[in-house]
Amino acid sequence: MAVVLHSSPIFWTRLAAVIFSCVAFSVAVHGGRLSHGTGDWCIFCWAFGFAGTLLVILVELFGLQTRAPVSWKNFPITFACYAALFCLSASILFPLYYLKGSIAQSETRDYRIVSTVFSCLATIAYISEVSMSKARPGEVAGYMATAPGLLKVCETFVACIIFVFVSDPVTYDRHDALKYCMSVYCICFILSAVIILLCIGECTGCLPFPFARFLSSYALLAVVLYLSATIIWPIFNFDPNNGGTKNRPSNCSIAQGLCVWDKNMAVSVLTAVNFVLYLVDLIYSSRLVFVNA
């Protein structure tokens, strides 16, 4: 089997991402002394990017794109976008939990600083890959290389971060309204993930209805659901009349990482972010239906 080496900017960008992510998790595992679940999440983010990008490089080196069980027009950029977002989250959470107020030994702290720096470099490399791979105006490309496709990736990623915040500890089970918000996050995440899988598997033509019309209908539904969650979640977490806490507790200032109040605030912000993403998605999807018509 012949090895095909295309010395292109995107190849060197992927190679840099592999190296940076490998260094980030190797250094953290070797000397970072990670003690709780956030460290496991960061290791997963870096290892996820390293393994997936290495796979993409090997497939293209050996010219196996046509034998891959996925659409090669959609898979590499979808993975690169996820890797960029995962590494970005690790670049934020890792120093927040392991450098902020850390009393670790100087050697351990140095290891953590190195992991943070290389995590940031990996994030930059993945963002560069997405920028180079996305569809240009007038260019024929897979759906995931377009703005609506990349928005789907961002929507599912933001939902994943919300799930992390609301589950450790569980903060949505004390009121039915908060459970409703959780159902909104789950429903929209599942549908967006299904759309991504359909595109990567090139199964959109198997649907019994036009894919473009389905995208616009779903985007409209998601906008309405997320608008309601954007209003309801803060009310039942920060309004004292509804069992919430308006002011940030004093113990949050000395807590390592994020306290429960901080996590609820983060979920409020992320819910609003996803509402905006779905609104932009709706605009793009509506334009797609109009053009097809």
Image (cartoon, helix red, strand yellow):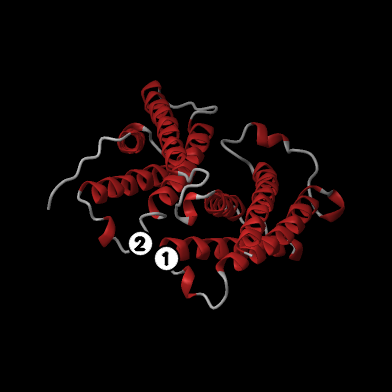
Please state which of residues 265 and 256 is positioned toward the viewer in this rendering.
Answer: 265
Residue shown at 25% from the left, 39% from the top: 6
Residue 180 as seen in the image, left or right of residue 130: right
Q: Gap between marks 1 and 2, in whole Å?
A: 7 Å
Residue shown at 81% from the left, 54% from the top: 243
Residue 282 is marked as: none
The 10 Å Cα crowd at callout 1, few under 14, some 14 to 19, many 20 or more, is some
Q: Residue 44 in the image: state x and y as whole percent.
A: 40, 47
Residue carrying label 2: 70
Residue 166 as seen in the image, left or right of residue 75: right
Residue type at mark 2 is Val
Residue 174 figure quarter: bottom right
The answer to whether residue 166 is above or below residue 197 is above
Q: Residue 292 in the image: state x and y as whole percent.
A: 60, 63
Residue shown at 79% from the left, 39% from the top: 247
In the displayed image of the protein, which residue is found farthest to the bottom?
A: 208
Residue carrying label 1: 202
Is the C-beta separation of discs 1 and 2 under 8 Å? yes
